[in-house]
Amino acid sequence: MTEKNFIVPASEFNTQIAGSVNAKSPSNIALVKYWGKTSPQIPTNPSISYTLTQSFTETQLNFAPKKAEFSNISVRLNGEEQPNFVPKIQQFFDRIHAYAPYLQDFDFEIITSNSFPHSSGIASSASGMSALAKCLLLLEEKMLFFVENPLQRASFMARLGSGSACRSLYPGLVAWGKSSFLPQSSDLFAVPVDTKIHPIFTQFEDTILLIHEGSKSVSSTVGHQLMNGHPYAAKRFDEAKQNIGKLLEILQNGDLESFGNLCEHEALSLHAVMLMSKPPYILMMPNTIAVINKIWEFRKETNLPLFFTLDAGANIHLLYPTNEKEKIRDYIEKELLTYCQNGKAIYDFVNFENL
Ligand code: DP6
């Protein structure tokens, strides 16, 4: 598959229609992280994520033939007009123009809401861009344009909105980026991890500790750029590539301890390269570090499989198998919630069902 396979001539679409489509899409949490990219949204290393359940975006896309020379785009989030979101959507539409030439013929109203609070510091780009890409596929269907593999096309488009978004089209474990360990994988779209998964990894919790609510001090788009010319970039990309192979083996053999070590190492590597970038960024907060130490202490004392991962921010994703939920939840509530800015966490879990 190349980019050319996704190009469709404008003549394929009847754009003289008005109406509305709706889509819902979840967020995901990367275990092996995507950090670094080249144009157009090509990852410098492959990544693997778990698709989540409770954290999602719902989007309604209203469309009508455009009235003026340029398309009008408006965005409402949780009922409020968001003019500052329009440039990001416009950039997305510009990037996919060759594949969705009909975009220039419509006025759009995007009405969207997240299941998680906007101020929570949870990135909404993965769920938001994947929900919008799904809406575009539904719009194409309304224009009587049918493709063989709509999920793949939606993932291809979502990637051009936000890299991590392309992984949100599939449930379970999802890979994005060409990897020698996954023959079906591609830099252009995500694919479901099709190897046999040990049952322990098919029912997994992700409790997100909201250590710091509010926006991050570095956007991921800026963050990825920090890897250009970074002295440790080659080593990081190489290690992430190897970690895909290691993770796939762990997912098959059910080795929880190695799983935790690998996820935590990935998260800390991401923050380590940020610490060493120019300019440097420290996205962990004192409470992020306090919780990491608590987790390590808890593990030493109890031998229970509680692990963490981090995104490019201060919040902590607590990863643990659902069959240990009771004991671990008790500990989270008694000992860890106190490190959250407002004592709040999001109790999410992995979704292996159809989305
Ligand atoms: C740390 O997908 O948000 O969450 O492609 O620029 O939109 P853009 O970046 P984005 O980056 C996500 C980075 C990460 C790791 C990951 O999800 O793999």
Image (cartoon, rainbow, N blue to C red):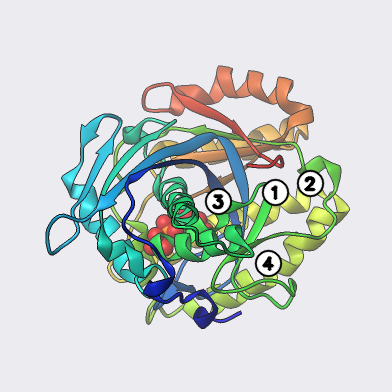
Callout 3 amino acid: Ser
Identify residue type, mark 1: Gly
Percent coordinates x, y for residue 78 in the rendering:
30, 30
Q: Position of residue 66 (x, y in %)?
A: 20, 56
**Point 24% across, 49% down: residue:** 85
- In the picture of the structure, the residue carrying the numbered disc 4 is 243
Residue assigned mark 2: 256
Using a 10 Å C-alpha cutoff, classify the residue at mark 1 as few (fewer than 14 neighbours), some (14 to 19) or many (20 or more).
some
Give how far apart the Cα atoms at labels 2 and 1 are.
6 Å
State the CA–CA distance, disc 2 to disc 3. 24 Å
What secondary structure is found at the residue carrying circle 4? helix
Secondary element at image label 2: helix
Give the mark, 1 or 3, whose residue is nearer the N terminus. 3
As drawn, the label of residue 168 is 3
Is residue 226 visible in this depiction of the protein?
Answer: no
Q: Farthest residue in the left direction?
A: 68
- Residue 351 horizontal/vertical position (percent): 66, 39
Q: Please tell me which residue lies in front, 162 or 232.
A: 162
Amino acid type at image mark 2: Leu
Contact check, label 2 and label 1, Cβ < 8 Å:
yes
Which mark is on residue 260?
Answer: 1
Q: Is residue 230 above or below residue 210?
A: below
**In this rendering, would 308 be left or right of 232?**
right
